[in-house]
Image (spheres, grey):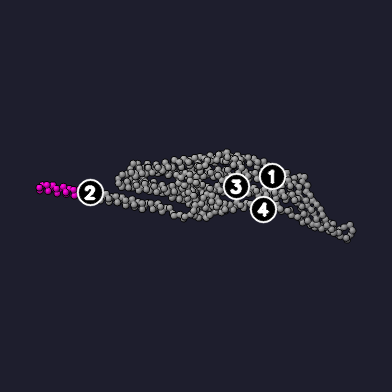
Amino acid sequence: MQVQSCAREILLLSLALVSVNLSVSQATAANDHATADAGSNQTIAEIMPALLRTTAPEPTVAPIPLSVAFDESIYNSPRVANIRTQLGITKAGYAQAYTLPNPSFFLLHDSAQLAKQVGALIPIESPWKIAFRVLLVKEQLKQTDLEIQKALWQLRSYTRRAYLDLVIAQETRNTLEELANLSRELQIVAKRRFQTGDVADMDVQRAELAALMAEADYNQSKRKVDQSRQCLSVVLGRNYDSPLEVQKLPAFELRVESNDLLPNFRTSAPSADELIQKALSKRLDLKVIAQAINVNIASLKNIRANTLPNVQVNAGYSYSGNPPIPSVATRGYFLGVTQELPLLNFQQGERAKNKAIDIQLKQQLAATRNVITEEVISAYQRMMAARERIGYFQTSILATSNVVAKMARRGYEVGQTDITTTMAAQQANVQTQIAYLDAVRNYQLAMTDLEQAVGEPL
């Protein structure tokens, strides 16, 4: 009985010791886990807020659509005011057209005959000369108006490019911000696994290096956003540091969402032949040259009207102190007409120059039509290529890239993949999104060139 009692006491003591050891092990593990969590929380507190502090809070401003940016640049930009002043310069031609030649005063004194003549030479201009000058100014006004429209149309392309630069800069910043946050999260995972002994310290160092590089790229992208916003504000006629927001690209998976910056895949693109025909009828370049031909025709009519010089009427007072009858002076008036004969100068030089200009303008018109055809074809092919590339990205590439990046990151968390594969997948996903933004940029640039080549909004 005593032996059994001793054996029972030894067994109970052993169970107690095992229970104590298990409690100590659990407490140690819990303490280690808490320490790891504390380290993780400290990493988040030290790293993530530091990253988030780089993003300054922006004022809430309603984004302006691209069409509103076009209107604002037309109404407010000082460049437009400068362009419109050309019309006033041309209108000043009316004052010149109605200007008549000045009369001349003369005084003649003949000491031998004791004669004096005082009078004026009054040129009489034919009414048709005034009419032809007015007609010329009217044609010049039409040409100036077309040139102003052409300059405003070019301003539209500047506005569109500045708007696009800001959109792409913002989307690139958001993409790089996402990469920076993912890199920091990967660094936290690497530290956790290092503390548990799953990976070497090299993984932590590599993750930290990738996070620092991603943060540097993100900070640079913010600078690019500020630059693009200030440039667009200046183009719109605002103060360069005024708050300004533009439209954002829709989510990658929303392919059919309506947006001015993306192609509408629900409708087919127009054919190249259709755009070429439209360009040949709409381009302001052709209209300016055609109007220049009309101006040259009006100028030729004005030259022909000036072939016959003006008639000069001479009139005045006449006094003679040495007439045939002594000591009797004579007084009276005189009246005469002077007409220059166009025998040697009949505007032959101006006519030859005018005809040469007419030939040059017609050749320029044909050359411009050829250039326009080439511009439309080039911009059209670039637009179609960019449109097709965007379609590939939206249908399959972007979704597949996101899935691969998530699977790689999850695989590293559970220990199925190494950090090299995970970092490569994240970098590839970001590069894919940047390539998508580049495709959108190329599409918009091609559309801008195509609109300029066609001569009307598309």
Determine the main secondary structure of the stretch shown in magenta: helix
Residue 423 visible in rendering = no
Residue at figure coordinates x 76%, y 47% from the top left: 308
Residue 19 visible in rendering = yes
User: Which residue corresponds to mark 2?
Assistant: 22
Left or right: residue 454 versus residue 296 is left
User: Which residue corresponds to mark 3?
Assistant: 150
Counting from the top left corner in percent of width and height, residue 293 is at 66, 44
Hey, what amino acid is under mark 2?
Answer: Leu
Task: Please tell me which residue lies in front, 328 or 37.
Answer: 37
Hey, what amino acid is under mark 4?
Answer: Ala
User: Which residue corresponds to mark 1?
Assistant: 297
Span shown in magenta = 1-23
Q: Secondary structure at mark 1?
A: helix
Q: Earlier in the sequence, mark 1 or mark 3?
A: 3
Q: Secondary structure at mark 4?
A: helix
* Front: mark 2 or 1: 2
Counting from the top left corner in percent of width and height, residue 243 is at 49, 54
Residue at figure coordinates x 35%, y 51% from the top left: 43
* Front: mark 3 or 4: 3
Q: Earlier in the sequence, mark 2 or mark 1?
A: 2
Mark 4–mark 1 Cα distance, whole angstroms, equals 20 Å
User: Which residue corresponds to mark 4?
Assistant: 92
- The quadrant where residue 430 appears: top left
Asked whether the beta carbons under mark 4 and mark 2 sit within 8 Å of each other, the answer is no
Q: Earlier in the sequence, mark 2 or mark 3?
A: 2
